């Protein structure tokens, strides 16, 4: 799909040079591509242009050369440049003996030649400094980080991180770690935001938080394992704000306070959409059991215990989840264990809520086995079709929500506001860390009003008494 032609982008030039973020006299070569109505990296040939100062016949001149890789361009820029010749001259000058200067005994004034030199302002070393080139490339650190840490992550998270690295970090791969400064990250974020709205997938982009989290993880890994004394952790508080897309970097936060009353409106619209009974039951189970969509979509009839005589003793076992891989050539699959399960606790057991029991009862049939929420061919529902059904139902119901995870938030808040107990909310979610529970366990906006109303009622009673 081609983007709409933008005359502000086209500069009436077949080829342009764009500055490489954080680099000095280094540019990326871009050629106009009529198919996409945009400047893009040339498919073949040299892709980088570098400049350096040289001495020729005693005169300084600016030399220019193109290269296939950024590493080749940096190497050429750092060797044979004017800076090396100046350094060599200064070393030769230092090797010469310093002439002695006699000072008359009666004179209290220091001769100009031996006055203490004025302190110069501290100069920040240029990015072409040899100390920078000695630091490892971002690419090498990423490879090590993946080898050490990827095994701890869920398969879906690994797939997402690989996608972020492939799409958003290619221009950074050949950059030395010491070149990654706060200003470099500013430029990198600006580049990310330049592409927003130019494709159908980026029109709903609200922030680059996930990409920033990947960068933060790699930088933390470098500081922990390399112990580089010349490296300063470059991420600043301003970068989190700068990662937001929109006017002045601001976006309105989405509401996640989905109440039971709003859920009923949402369910009513799901029943008017595609695959109605399956989608409506899936939403009810996800909300009241506070499940991730990957866990709810992987539920089997063998995972639920429906006690017909005493429904209050019915249970739900979360023992597997769908690994949703969003790459075009990657296929999702079901994996044993809930998403953040451990070897010690591979199954999460929950008491079944009444609405969950009633919803599952509507789908149950004698001899039911295998997937509960499935397509006509027996396979699990894809993330795209679930999200599509949810988003359209929210829109038709006039509710300010989107996505699937809002149901996990809403279900947890419902239980927390009913009990006021963080430990109960943590048990429902299956989190090992209470900090993660605090993200979900929020009070309704009316909670403080109810507390104040209770105080007023008690004060009236005390006055009458």
Image (cartoon, rainbow, N blue to C red):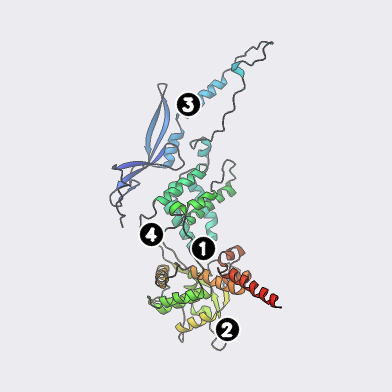
Q: Which residue is mark 4?
A: 201
Q: Earlier in the sequence, mark 1 or mark 4?
A: 1
Q: Earlier in the sequence, mark 1 or mark 2?
A: 1
Quote the CA–CA distance across marks 1 and 2: 33 Å
Q: Residue furthest right?
A: 465
Q: Earlier in the sequence, mark 3 or mark 2?
A: 3
Quote the CA–CA distance across marks 3 and 1: 53 Å
Quote the CA–CA distance across marks 2 and 4: 45 Å
Quadrant in the picture for residue 271: bottom left
Q: Earlier in the sequence, mark 2 or mark 4?
A: 4
Disc 2 element: helix
Residue in the image at 58% along x and 84% along y: 312
- In the image, which disc is placed on residue 154? 1
Q: Earlier in the sequence, mark 3 or mark 1?
A: 3
Q: Earlier in the sequence, mark 3 or mark 4?
A: 3
Check disc 3: other Cα within 10 Å, few if <14, some if 14-19, many if 20+: some
Question: Observer-nearest residue: 151 or 127?
Answer: 127
Q: Is residue 94 above or below residue 415?
A: above
Disc 1 element: loop
Q: Which residue is mark 2?
A: 312
Work out which quarter of the rendered image holds the C terminus and state it: bottom right
| Residue 137 position within the rendered picture, expressed as x and y whole percent measured from the top left | 49, 44
| Residue 438 position within the rendered picture, expressed as x and y whole percent measured from the top left | 59, 64
- Which is more foreground, mark 1 or mark 2? 2
Check disc 1: other Cα within 10 Å, few if <14, some if 14-19, many if 20+: some
């Amino acid at each position: 799909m081609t983007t709409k032609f933008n005359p502000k982008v086209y500069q009436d030039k077949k080829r342009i040079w764009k500055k490489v973020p954080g680099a000095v006299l280094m540019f990326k070569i871009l050629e106009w591509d009529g198919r996409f109505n945009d400047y893009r990296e040339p498919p073949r040939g040299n892709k980088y242009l570098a400049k350096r100062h040289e001495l020729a016949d005693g005169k300084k001149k600016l030399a220019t050369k193109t290269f296939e890789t950024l590493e080749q361009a940096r190497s050429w820029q750092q060797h044979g440049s004017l800076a090396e010749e100046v350094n060599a001259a200064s070393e030769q000058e230092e090797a010469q003996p310093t002439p002695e200067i006699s000072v008359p005994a009666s004179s209290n004034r220091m001769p100009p030649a031996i006055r203490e030199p004025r302190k110069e302002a501290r100069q920040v070393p240029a990015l072409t400094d040899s100390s920078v080139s000695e630091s490892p490339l971002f690419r090498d650190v990423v490879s090590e980080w993946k080898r050490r840490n990827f095994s701890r992550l869920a398969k879906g998270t690994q797939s997402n991180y690989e996608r972020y690295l492939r799409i958003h970090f290619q221009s950074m791969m050949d950059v030395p770690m010491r070149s990654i400064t706060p200003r470099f990250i500013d430029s990198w974020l600006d580049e990310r935001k330049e592409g927003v709205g130019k494709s159908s997938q980026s029109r709903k982009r609200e922030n680059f938080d996930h990409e920033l989290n990947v960068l933060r993880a790699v930088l933390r890994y470098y500081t922990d394992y390399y112990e580089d004394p010349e490296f300063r952790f470059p991420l600043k508080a301003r970068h989190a704000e700068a990662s937001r897309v929109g006017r002045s970097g601001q976006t309105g936060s989405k509401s996640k306070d989905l109440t039971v009353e709003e859920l009923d409106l949402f369910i009513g619209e799901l029943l008017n959409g595609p695959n109605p009974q399956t989608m409506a039951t899936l939403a009810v189970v996800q909300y009241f059991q506070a499940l991730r969509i990957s866990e709810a979509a992987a539920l089997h009839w063998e995972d639920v215990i429906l006690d017909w005589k005493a429904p209050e003793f019915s249970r739900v076992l979360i023992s597997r989840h769908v690994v949703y891989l969003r790459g075009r050539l990657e296929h999702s699959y079901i994996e044993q264990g809930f998403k953040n399960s451990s070897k010690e606790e591979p199954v999460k057991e929950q008491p079944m809520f009444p609405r969950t029991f009633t919803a599952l009862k509507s789908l149950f049939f004698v001899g039911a086995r295998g997937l509960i929420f499935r397509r006509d061919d027996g396979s699990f529902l894809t993330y795209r079709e679930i999200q599509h059904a949810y988003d359209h139902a929210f829109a038709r119901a006039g509710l300010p929500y989107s996505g699937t995870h809002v149901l996990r938030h809403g279900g947890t808040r419902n239980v927390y506001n009913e009990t006021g107990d963080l430990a109960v909310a943590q048990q429902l979610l299956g989190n090992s860390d209470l900090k993660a529970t605090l993200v979900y366990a929020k009070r309704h906006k009316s909670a403080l009003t109810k507390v104040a109303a209770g105080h007023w009622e008690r004060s009236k009673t005390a006055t009458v008494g």
